[in-house]
Image (cartoon, rainbow, N blue to C red):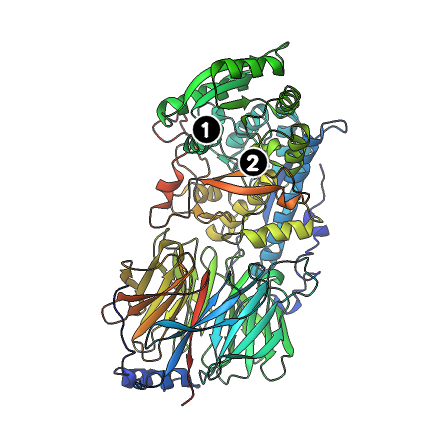
Amino acid sequence: MLGTTLKRFVRWQILAGVVALGSAVPALAQFGPDGDVRIGIILPSVADDAPNWQRELAEQVEHGAILGAEEHAFNAELLGIEFDVLFERASGPEAAVAAAQRLADSGVLGVAGGYSLEEAAALGAWAENAGLPFLNIGTQSDALRNDQCFATTFHIEASAGMYLDSLAGWYVRDGFRRWYIVRSDSAEGEDLYERLQWSLENRHFGVREVGQAVLTDGVTAEDLINGWEDSGADLLVLLLDPQEQLDVMAGLEAGGYTGQVAGYPYAATQTREYFLALRDLAPSIPHFRAALWEPTIDTSGGIEFNLRHRNRWDGETMDGPAWAGFHAVKILFDSASFSRSVDPTTIIEYMRSPTSVFDLHKLLGASFRPWNQQLRQPLYLVSIDPDETSVFRLGLLVGQLPALYLSGTDPVERLDQIGDLAGDSTCNI
Amino acid sequence: MVHRIQPRAGSRSKARLGLLATTAFVSAVALTTSAPAQDDEAQYLVYVANEYNADVSVIDPRTNEVVQTIAISGRPGDVRPRGMAVSPDGHTIYIAVSDFNPEFETPEDKIVGIDVETNEIVLELNAGGNPERVALTPDGTEIWASLEALARGAGYYVETGEQFANFVVGVEAEGVAVSPDGRWVYVTAEATHTVSVYDRETESVLTHLLVGNRPRVVEFSPDGAFAYVTAEIGGTISVIDVSTHTVVQTVNLGLDSRPVEIAVDPTQPRIFVAGGGTSAVYVVDVENYEVDTVIREQMGRRPWGITITGDGSLVYTANGLSDSVSVIDTDCLCVIDNIVAGRGPHSAQIGVVPQ
């Protein structure tokens, strides 16, 4: 256990150096939940020799969650609320559950974490049994939103279906209609492939799958290029894990491939660090990536929010995983403060309520879908600049789905255009 | 374009004066702009802060055309004029200007004052920390600002530019208003969902109170009894009883209402609320706390700023996505004109031309 309550070493560097609330202690405090607001965050535990992208993912989640803890410590002090964020580090389902139990023993009102299907499912089962909300911030698997869903699990990370529907929407609209799909030789690769096929059959009818391959041992980039050329495809879709995507991109570059590639956006592939690696390995290939968040967003407080993160972390951008870490803290804190309760059952009810909305810096108030407790939210398409030297400006925001800038329609209708909707869900909460 | 009109005579001035007489400080803006319009000389001008052009459009309400553009900075995009306020006599327009490029060596975070008679910048005071909105005390001697990047509220003397007060508010400070009796400064914070209450008498923060999700703007009722706070994400207006600093009513405009700025009608118990992302203006009855009318037809895109003439006859909205200003007749509650402004209109204010 990291053990220490973060509050002890909060450094509110953004706010003119120091939190000086001497004169600002509420004299007429009209609000305060009954007891301490205490939140538990389980961070990924990464081996020292892990690849850069894996360590970057862990650091992003940690930095986002710490910023969330600091900001909400500040908010709590304004409102006269006792507030703590407790951190644990764990890897694997057993370790994650043990960490969650330690957090529960410390009195947290909710836990966030989950960086693989196994880990998130184990935490979901544990949380349901413990009667605590579990916020999934790192796992996209649709299984968690369907057959393996749990009553007290809430998904801040977008689902695989949401990402795949968005990718289909963007590429179809841009005229890419003949897809060659490469998937990992794994159950997860198979799941992604089936979900993408469903999307093409049910929502994006303009696309034809003209070829496919499974990345088994012995399959080379040259094989993929040949398959792509023989099929007459105009888009190569890589449903591969982060390391496989890097390896394949390097092979494609070496093989002279210069066509369009759509890589599946695992959380670890949404960081500037990963974008740089992709660009360095395959400078001749155009790169567009889907993301949960983009550091150059400048609407709805996004510019200030991104800037606070960069100021706090010495110029580091707030990428998707950091955004998820921050909002795990925010959603639990706001649920407690608006429901005026620290009772986990009340918090769960608040989060489930269709009238509860959360401010995610994404333009609209977001709510959780009642059928699988997936957070409604837009996703972003980012173009990687081949020549940019600034890490911040490396990505350029080029798309958003659903497109929220269109005014005058119901926000829930707008956001329920991607992912598994009520009629498609097999979750039985 | 619908049609052009001349500003109307102040047919409602009696009722308005009755309201104002109950307050300790009488707004000269309301008095002056209610006078009948002259044919040869504008009684008032409409000022529009163009966030992405780094300038201010000046509109003559007799022709509904931009008659002058006042440059605020040579760095459009980075330096953004946003919230506005007007001096009690109506003769000076104040604009909060934020510098969004933190690497720049000479940041232009500042508050700018424009003389309505000459349309020249007559005041420029340093206000570091991304000032987003400003408000004036009823006697016009102090400017109060929300400093968004610092989560602070601050007070400045108009005459010297000296900052004499600086206090903690919530994260992403935005709205600021001074009560008509001059006692209270209310500051909203978008990310903390709070209103901070600063007591000018004791020179300290009295309390921070939770309101709706992502509060943007706060305005006081003319008699100072209530304050109205828009919550953009919550789609609500919190009504605060100023005598207790507690939320006593919440008006629900709907989740997709996205309310931002408020114009308080000086003649009737109603407020006009700019429905930002919905391209609508909500007319809210603040006696019964009900939405009376939603004005959508002919509205510009993303009305963010909103202001009302002293006689309550016309409302102007600053429309950020259509680079325009919509003119609303408050009798028909309909848009009667749309005026091309600069890029990204954020706020609008009415300046009274000295006679």
Give me the disc on residue A161: 1
Q: Which of B230/A219 is in front?
A: A219
Name the spot of residue B202 as percent of width and height, x first: 59, 79
Q: Nearer the viewer, mark 2 or mark 1?
A: 1
Q: Which of A92/A317 is in front?
A: A317
The amino acid type, in three-letter code, at marker 2 is: Ile
Give me the disc on residue A137: 2
The amino acid type, in three-letter code, at marker 1 is: Gly
Circle 1 chain: A
Name the spot of residue B70 as percent of width and height, x first: 50, 72
Decide: is B11 above or below A364: below
Within-10-Å neighbours for mark 2: few <14, some 14–19, many 20+: many
Say whether mark 1 and mark 2 are on the same chain.
Answer: yes
Identify the secondary structure beneath mark 2.
Answer: loop
Identify the secondary structure beneath mark 1.
Answer: helix
Quadrant of the image occupied by residue B305: bottom left
Indicate the quadrant containing the N terminus of chain A: top left, top right, bottom left or bottom right.
top right
